[in-house]
Amino acid sequence: MTDALDKRFGLNGKVALVTGGGQGIGRAAGLALAEAGASVAVVDLNLEQADQVAAAIREQGGQAIAIRGDVTEPGTIESMMKQTTDELGRLDILINNAGIYPFSDFLETSDDVWNRVVDLNLTAVFRCSRTAGQIMADQGGGGCIVNLASVQGLKPTNGGLVPYDTTKAAVVMLTKATALELGPHQIRVNAIAPGVVPTPGTRDVLSETEAVSVQRTPMGHLGTAEDVANTILFLASPAACFITGETIAVDGGYVLT
Ligand SMILES: NC(=O)c1ccc[n+]([C@@H]2O[C@H](COP(=O)([O-])OP(=O)(O)OC[C@H]3O[C@@H](n4cnc5c(N)ncnc54)[C@H](O)[C@@H]3O)[C@@H](O)[C@H]2O)c1
């Protein structure tokens, strides 16, 4: 990167925390942020996978730690943020990526499924943002939060995802409302609404639905985890310094159809 480009897109000296960073979009996000110079805390339920991502970052010459944690547990949120600031020095970038998308027909959706989806896809995003926002404000302000919403939160195109669609729509509003309050601290809050992206989490469902998803995408192909990570990187970079409260669809036009 030239010095001029580095000023616009570089993340040297910044510290990022990625929830659900052990695989899929979270993994791609951690690697991309590290490539731009950020130190990265990779948080995941699965420590082995988080460890692999952190090791890959260190092999590229970056700095990373792996943390095992369930972000639906408030105690975990406190401890993972503390470990990040203790070991990496500060916190500048939070990527609220961990999410689940269990399929069930609406009339058969149990309270348990509803509660599990709300706890992770919405409440954990709120709690992680509140804790990270406080740390960023206490550091003197400045920072950014990127939330993973979904095109399904903008328009419910696939059935069987009522709790998911509802939480992702709520994440779009959480993003705007949080951006409004954190703006004075120079903390930016944005969201990304990916279309269908092959990841370990979507592998099973895609084996049956890939053709339909491709057909519904004006660009005629599915995106990749790296496509989403590129937009996360942009939103975290100095180049996006005046963007807040936005949700960017990364979907090849899926939401237009
Ligand atoms: N893949 C897609 O097509 C797609 C489309 C739109 C939005 N999204 C959103 O992007 C995000 C990532 O999706 P993905 O497909 O990469 O997911 P994935 O299922 O492949 O990976 C999710 C990761 O999060 C971790 N995780 C799950 N619960 C956790 C918890 N309670 N605490 C900590 N870590 C936890 C998992 O162990 C896993 O490593 C999700 O929020 C998802 O809703 C994905």
Image (cartoon, rainbow, N blue to C red):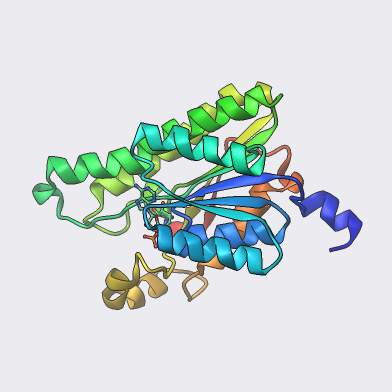
Residue at screen point 25% across, 52% down: 161
Between 220 and 60, the one nearer to me in the picture: 60
Between 255 and 83, the one nearer to me in the picture: 83
Locate residue 107, reporting x and y percent. 9, 48
Q: Residue furthest left?
A: 108
Q: Is residue 252 visible?
A: no
Residue at screen point 42% across, 70% down: 198
Q: Residue furthest front?
A: 87
> Does residue 176 appear to the left or right of 231 in the view shown?
left
Locate residue 226, reporting x and y percent. 57, 66
Residue at screen point 34% across, 36% down: 73
Quadrant holding the N terminus: bottom right
Question: Is 139 located above or below residue 47 in the figure?
Answer: above
Quadrant holding the C terminus: bottom left
Between 152 and 131, the one nearer to me in the picture: 131
Between 186 and 211, the one nearer to me in the picture: 186
Residue at screen point 32% across, 47% down: 165
> Does residue 164 appear to the left or right of 55 in the view shown?
left
Count of numbered circles on the image: 0
Q: Is residue 165 visible?
A: yes
- Figure quarter occupied by ligand 1: bottom left
Q: Residue furthest right?
A: 3
Question: Is 73 located above or below residue 239 in the figure?
Answer: above
Question: Is 41 located above or below residue 85 in the figure?
Answer: below
Locate residue 144, reporting x and y percent. 63, 38
> Does residue 74 appear to the left or right of 256 in the view shown?
left
